[in-house]
Image: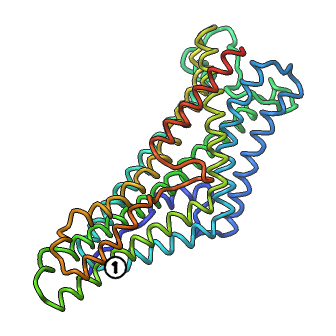
Amino acid sequence: MKYKRVQYFNLNRILLLTVGLWPNYQSRVAQFQYILCFSIFVTSILFQCATFLTSRCTLDFVIHIFSSTFFSAVILTIYISFGVNIKVVKDLLAQLYNIYNQLNDVNEYAIVEKYNYYAKCYTIGLTTLGVCSTFTILVGQYWSYILDMVVPINESRTHNMLFTAEYFIDQDRYLVLSMLHMSVAWCVGIMTMVATGATLIAYFEYTCGMFKIASYRIEQAVNIDVLKNNNLKEILTFKGIICAVNIQRKAMKLSTQLLSRFEIMFLFLIIFHVSSMSLNLFRIFQITSSKFDIRKLILPVTCVTANVIYMFLSNNVGQRITDHNNEVYATVYNVQWYLAPLHIQKMLLFLLQRAASDFSLRVGGLFIASFECFATLVKASVSYFTVIYSTW
């Protein structure tokens, strides 16, 4: 029986193409896109940091600048890491394709479609959040111009950027160009976070599907029919268990290979996320405790929201990988292994011994991607915020 193959990463491909990071399309156009986006990110950070050369460096001013530059550093780190490891990502995606395209069981294919649906939901959800955040920032950036068109007045309104940057030019004369540059940097940056984040989540969702297939194969291999004294059925049971262990090992291998290539990136992201969240929380406190300005709240609130969502989804993926791997061993416990022939019981016992060592996504040997790690990072961010507040 032939099945219609799942279109893996079809939505992610479109998103990655817009920022020149789709692994299977690395033409001169894609290379030009990469250089252009990289230049936009770097210049946006440099122009924000250049304000230290022309302004008085008070504690409030330093926090104000770093609250946005740390978030920009998150985007730049993601973009550089994904671009450097583009060939590795291409190879890992090819391995994933080959594993899934070799499936020939209708129930296993149904599992693939289920996790493909999860991956699409994550991609659509993140894209929606990205569009909403971009729209919010652009409205805040050009709010005074929007009011000039919607509610014109005789007096001229004050026009200023949502971001603080120094371009070493006549700020009033070239304000529109400066705002355009920062707006483009934000739009491309959010698109980069959405495209790369959704792709990595989809990749790990497919590996979760492989763990689920391993559980299914164990259930099918060890069933009530194996109790009958039939050599052919025992051979099929052996093959089923071997196939289950094989795809579980492949899922573990693909997960660790991807994590090992992006381990440095994740370490930097943890530092930048916590720093950005702490500083932006303090910015929110400053704005709300002094002269309340909704427009000034847009940027720090958006950054805090993006940081929380990114940290939560990253740790949620690690938690799902751990849970799906443990589910494989839980399946072995739940099947009627005690009624199987002795030599099959010994084989299952050997498999159960592996459950003593948990499989998880570890970053730098310090952080284990899980809900507990997410809570720890949020707690650290709030703690640093209180430290800054105590010194303010």
Residue 130 visible somewhere in the drawing: no
Quadrant that contains the C terminus: top right
Return the residue nearer the eye: 190 or 63.
63
Compared with 196, 386 (above or below) is above
Return the residue nearer the eye: 176 or 155.
176
Q: Is residue 246 left or right of residue 308?
A: left
Q: Identify residue type, mark 1.
A: Cys
Compared with 392, 331 (above or below) is below
Return the residue nearer the eye: 101 or 29.
101
Quadrant hosting residue 26: bottom right
Label 1: how many Cα within 10 Å (few below 14, some 14–19, many 20+)? some
Query: Can you give x and y, in whole percent of width and height, for residue 84 in the image?
Result: 69, 62
Compared with 143, 4 (above or below) is below
Q: Which residue is the site of mark 1?
A: 243
Compared with 382, 227 (above or below) is below
Query: Can you give x and y, in whole percent of width and height, for residue 314 in the image?
Result: 50, 47
What residue sits 61% from the left and 50% below the top? Answer: 266
Return the residue nearer the eye: 140 or 352.
352
What residue sits 73% from the left and 46% below the top? Answer: 40
Q: Residue furthest bottom?
A: 231
Q: Name the secondary structure under disc 1.
A: helix
